[in-house]
Amino acid sequence: MSKQHLPRYNGNFELDQKGKTFVMPSGELSSFDDLVILDTSIDTVRQLYKGTPDEALLNDLSERLEDSPGKAQYHWFGRPWLLRRGGKSGFAYLLQNVSDGLVVLIKNNHIKADQEGSHVKIELSPKVIRDQYPESLQIMMDDIAREACTDEPTPNGCAIHLACDLQGWTPPANLAESLTCRSHKVYDRNGFSDLSVTTGEVAAIYGRGQSYTFGSASSLQFAIYNKSKEIYAHDKADFFLPIWREKVAEDLTTKLYNEDAPVWRCEARFSHTVINQFADYNQVNLKSFEAVTAYLGNIWRYALQNFRLDCSRDYVHPLWTLLEQDAEFYPPSPSFTEKRMYKRPGIGNEKNVALALGNLLSIYARNNISARQAWKCLKKSGMWADLMGYCKQRKVSKDELFEVIEQGLKERRLASKVAA
């Protein structure tokens, strides 16, 4: 049974979908009248493109860095850029234009330059995301990718961060213990206040409860941190303060931002992999930023369900109700299910399964192993689950698979060099 939301009441204690008073499971009243959502936004976009990089451009970028080791000024796509090596990004070259809020990464280090692949990644800053419509940004990114490739590049995945800035609430000291997620708590005294780790999952607390991070950066991550401190630490005050100061009440005149109170940000970070899993489950194309924006309400709700603050075994915490129901992302699409399609054994790696089976049969034939012995060996080979998934997808029964193995061994002994 999924967790439920507590009913909401207004100041007159009437049921109200916008009310901020809750009756807790203990019977006590809990009021969130002071809580104000100052802003909801797309904080980060990372768009991947599949294509073949322009060899002339790669040569030019390489030569410029040879002339100016470390970094160089570069003019490309009608704009000035700061050119650097890609470093740990996984790409060979990084082009940055801070004034336009753009970072372009070119030439995937894990794919040959003359092979088609995810050779272009474009990252957008919060300012450029706020200033333009998704359709306009997608056109601009498509044009940049086209300039970097010799063929027609196609969007190949989008990572996105969604943020909600609020006042009137401070994370409790036991937030890490109270938040429901897959992390288990351990301690580390080297620079962190607290650190939690499981396989692929991390929860960390920085700066004495000023920043909490849950989950893996390569999958789905949820962060809660003091945004009013972070904007000064990273010189972003001139951008964020005017946004918060513009927030007004329903009377359109009363300013809601309190200059003396901290602003806390709740941020959900979705990797390319997670977005692709949503797409697979719902059978929709979510390779581009523009396509993902149609489902922002859905993926935001999914993040809140996977990193959840509860107030009892049956109910979520009122704050989570307010974050889900009052944060103004696009309304959730009723046709979209907030579930991810994980890769099942034998699905998505069919070629590898077929090659592995063929290679093993060749080895078994060379060693004069019978079909029944081969069957037992395959069960212990480490590929059995993938092989069963491969057969299930193609509606091949176990008896039919055994016949394929038996026939394959006979053919290899009779017609191939293994019999020599």
Image (spheres, rainbow, N blue to C red):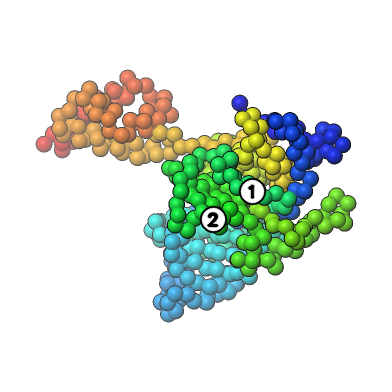
Residue found at x 82% / y 57%: 255
Residue 239 position within the rendered picture, expressed as x and y whole percent measured from the top left: 69, 65
Q: Residue furthest top?
A: 399
Q: Can the viewer see residue 296?
A: yes
Q: What distance separates the C-alpha of mark 1 from that of mark 2?
A: 13 Å
Q: Is residue 351 above or below residue 166?
A: above
In terms of secondary structure, where does tag 2 sit? strand
Whether pointer 1 and pointer 2 mark residues with C-beta atoms closer than 8 Å, the reply is no
Q: Which residue is mark 2?
A: 206
**Which corner quadrant holds the C terminus?**
top left
- Tell me the element at label 1: loop
Which is nearer the N-term, disc 1 or disc 2? 1
Q: Which residue is mark 1?
A: 171
Quadrant housing residue 333: top right
Q: Residues within 10 Å of mark 1 (few under 14, many from 20)?
A: some
Q: In the figure, 208 relative to 292: above or below?
A: below
Q: Is residue 409 left or right of residue 193?
A: left
Type of residue at label 1? Pro
Q: Position of residue 300 (x, y in %)?
A: 64, 44
Looking at the image, residue 319 sits to the left or right of residue 46; the answer is: right
Camera-side residue: 185 or 64? 185
Q: Residue furthest left?
A: 420
